Amino acid sequence: MLETLKAFFSFSDPSIVSVTLGAVLLSASSAVVGTFTFLKKKALVGDAVAHAVLPGICLAFLLAGNKNPLFLLLGAFITGWISLVLIDWITARSKIKEDTAIALILSVFFGIGILLLTRIQHMGNAAQTGLQSFLFGKAAALVGQDLLIFGIVAVLLLCTVALFFKELKLIAFDEAFAQATGLPVRGLNLLLTTLTVLAVVTGIQAVGVVLMAAMLITPAAAARFWTDSVLRMTFIAAFMGAFAGLAGAFVSYAAPSMPTGPWIVMIISIIALFSFFFAPQRGILYRQYQQRKLQRQIMEENVLKELYHLGEKDKGAHKGRTIDDLIKERYFPEKQLRTALLRLRQKGWVERQNGHWKFTEAGQQKGRRVVKLHRLWEAYLSTYLKIAPDHVHEDAETIEHIITPELEAELEHMLDFPERDPHQSKIPY
């Protein structure tokens, strides 16, 4: 395996260089354009265009009589662009929704493409050999004139996105604001449409019509899990696309029977799945961890609050309480209550003596603050939102755990440091 890696990255074979460079360029440029398609919530558009370019490729071959990459690219671009125009026209002029229009255009254009491809295969023209590879891609064909033309288009895509980055970012999030600032929104949408079609047209040589939508959208979807910045998201998507192209070319080199295009899609899909689960802030596992952490926090603060309530009732703030005392005051699952008390003891908020649990000084202050926030919020709901006192408790039970010190100070100022809540319970300060 190590020898294979060394041989591949030595790039001693010009054909390896061509295929690798082509796969990296096409994958990266598709990912960059796909970022804005993804942000505009038009993920299915790439699938429609990818299927709509097939009749253009076939018609270009019929007119030219050979597989000239420039003619094929031009034919694919024309039918791909027409498909997007038709989708917008159908959506605007009829009651058909966009997803239905996309499905309609996708199936009709792809059906026409298959008919034309079948017709070409029965014509007996020797030049048609390999034309069907556009269905599933054939990165090995990215050599010579093909690489030059598709590479130029890929670089043109990257440069155009860099030049109009701010404008594309703005229309991706707020077209109305972009129009209000004087930007030519229709022209920019037309530009993005053109870039999307070009990205699909260039990418199909590597991954094919069927898999192209994955290369357009998957890197952007994966990158979204790692950042809030559109600029960083674009760079991450480009890097993921380029890495997938490089890795796909290597797999194809190491195992010649393995096609490059499907492996590019497979690798970017693995990267996306990893991002979905393990990305910080947005990953599924991270969110589950945060959710469990919040649940533990709520449980601990509820226990402290009930200890404080018991102290209010019998004027014994530091009196020891049993598990049964707490459950009588407020129902807790006993196992969860015991676990929460152990965590509170580790944090130094409660201590255990002779089977009884009681506050430490720090724990009493923490419990007092939870009760204070609960009652402050009840007072706010009753005073400003005119909610009846018997309807404010449930909302305060939730909000008390997430009120920040800044919001706490604002509530105190707005309510002029009230002494009692709507139930006439004293608000502790």
Image (cartoon, helix red, strand yellow):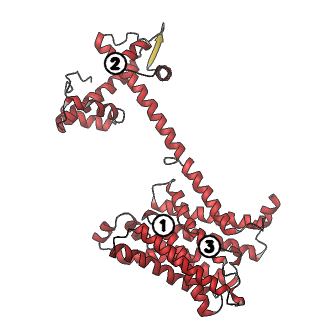
Q: Residue at x 17, y 36 (%)?
A: 386
Q: Distance between the residues labelled 3 and 2?
A: 67 Å
Task: State which quadrant residue 209 falls in.
Answer: bottom right
Callout 1 amino acid: Leu
Residue 339 at x, y percent in the picture? 50, 22
| Mark positioned earlier in the residue sequence (3 or 2) | 3
- Which residue is under mark 3? 208
- Which residue is under mark 1? 44
For disc 2, the neighbor class at 10 Å (few under 14, some 14 to 19, many from 20) is many
For disc 1, the neighbor class at 10 Å (few under 14, some 14 to 19, many from 20) is some
Along the horizontal axis of the image, is 234 left or right of 249?
Answer: left
Along the horizontal axis of the image, is 316 left or right of 257?
Answer: left
Residue 322 at x, y percent in the picture? 43, 11
Callout 2 amino acid: Tyr
Q: Can residue 7 be seen in this view?
A: yes
Q: Can residue 155 be seen in this view?
A: no
Residue 212 at x, y percent in the picture? 58, 70
Numbered mark located on residue 308 in the image? 2
Along the horizontal axis of the image, is 38 left or right of 177?
Answer: right
